[in-house]
Image: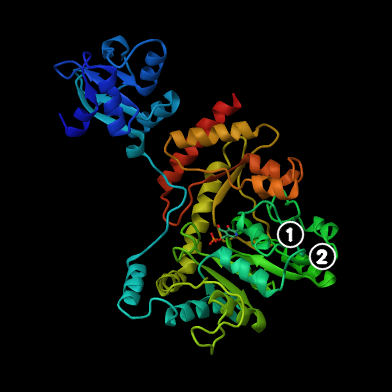
Amino acid sequence: MDKRISSITLGESNTIKEAMERINKTGLRIVIITNESKKLLGVVTDGDIRRALLTGKNFQTLLKEIITTSPIKAVEGAPAMDLLKIMAEKNIQEIPIVDKNGVLVDIVLLSEIKSIPLSSPDITSKDVEAINQVLSTSFLSIGPKVKEFEKKIANYIGVKYAVAVNSGTSGLHLCVRSLDIKDGDEVITAPFSFIASANCMLFERAKPVFVDIDEKTLCIDVNKIEEKITEKTKAIMPVHIFGHSCEMDKIMEIAKKHNLAVIEDACEAIGGEYKGKKVGSFGDASVFAFYPNKQITTAEGGMIVTDNEKIAKLCQSMRNQGRDDNNEWLSHMRLGYNYRMSELSAALGVAQMDRIDEILGKRQKIAEYYNEQLKKINGVEIPYASLDVKMSWFVYTIKLDSKRFSRENRNQAIEDLRKRGIACKAYFPPIHLEPFYVDMFDYKKGSFPVTESVSDLTIALPFYNNLPEKEIDYICDSLKDIMESLND
Ligand SMILES: Cc1ncc(COP(=O)(O)O)c(C=O)c1O
């Protein structure tokens, strides 16, 4: 018998202690019990052991006293789809496989037959080559690749300046600082985002003032912005959520009327457009991010873009410990940080930018394929894209119908998808309900009802450049089954 099976197989005369040792060693949740001819007799699960000990059995109790006979099993050659279905229905992650004589021949683990990640970076041999080339030079930081990457992004977005940094969060922070937003100032943004959008104001003791989102676009509701403007308001930070542009003409109009700066959080939206113009080219400054789940990646990284020379110069200085261009290494003009992007990251960024159109095209196709499949499922709403925008698909997020489903239903759907080996996430939890925001600002449930209701019902499904259609079929078929059971 193969080593793996023997490591999880015991006999009826072994003890609870021996079973616990096996479970501890293998990390599985069962041991399989066979007779001398290796015929499957049953299984003992970690739950069986727990219950046995709670009801007075002890470490020396023999497994024959607690065995589950006639366990769930499958015969050699059973299709993976059937096994997955059984695992999901019975809430198990391991199935013993027997031959036609009932002899144990294998064990199938859920993680082995299906594991679709939520995201996956798309790194080609050219990308690797680009990184290796940098490694063979003496410039691993502060070298030509960062400049090349900056130039590429500036040209692509159609702005004068681009400043590479080591994350989207540091980019946002530098924008806040370079616009002199400080203690007591207010910046208007949306509570439905990744937390860094609002945290970058807190870094400077400024206050993120939230405005609820539009139910369809999931971006800031432009009709609710003006009512939140006070004499302390310094800026608006629209977040192009999931790669869908905010209504930039209205936002720019409001900003102009009230003399406010605009920082676009375009971390999720590189290549997206609003009325034919690239996101990131509207505001005083904008930021893209390149974490591995993003459209293009530099492993960690971000990019500030702007047409404003003063902002660009300040950001260049502050990302590099407050040095100015012509400063000595140990001469610092202002408070700064180490927010520099490495040459390795920049080289990867350049290589990824060389095929950005191809990447965005692939993502568009995957989103369209999902849309086609999911349209047919009762109770599932596919992502909305306004006619004014060109999406740059960051994630693919569905929403359950609010008239029929609750947060609990959504959580159940997520759990059921995961049981079928499909990674998925509730995307995003509202920022204002994060515990430290509640502590700081006394937000309560109900403060931003649209954000909260959307947050309760959304599910981000697996989404990445090379997600095969057959995996999308599997995800959609699984979701259909799950929705039918929720509908019952
Ligand atoms: C909307 C938004 N803002 C900011 C960030 C922060 O970017 P990073 O993770 O690179 O710091 C992210 C990252 O996911 C984001 O989605």
Q: Quadrant of residue 346?
A: bottom left
The spot of residue 437 in percent (x, y) is 68, 49
The disc labelled 1 sits on which kind of residue?
A: Lys
Q: Is residue 270 visible?
A: no
Q: Quadrant of residue 375?
A: top right
In front of the other: 471 or 207:
207
The spot of residue 139 in percent (x, y) is 38, 80
User: How much space separates mark 1 and mark 2, taking CA atoms?
Assistant: 9 Å
The spot of residue 407 in percent (x, y) is 63, 35
Tell which residue pokes out farthest to the bottom in this image: 326
- State whether residue 473 is above or below residue 133: above
Q: Where's the N terminus, which quadrant? A: top left
**What residue is shown with label 1?**
207
**Quarter of image, ligand 1:** bottom right
Tell which residue pokes out farthest to the front in this image: 330
Q: Residue at x 29, y 18 (%)?
A: 16
> Helix, strand, or loop for circle 1?
strand
* Numbered marks: total: 2
**What residue is shown with label 2?**
232
Of marks 1 and 2, which one's residue comes earlier in the chain?
Answer: 1
- Residue 408 appears left or right of 72: right
Q: Residue at x 37, y 30 (%)?
A: 93
Q: Residue at x 47, y 48 (%)?
A: 118
- State whether residue 240 is above or below residue 447: below
Asked whether the beta carbons under mark 1 and mark 2 sit within 8 Å of each other, the answer is yes
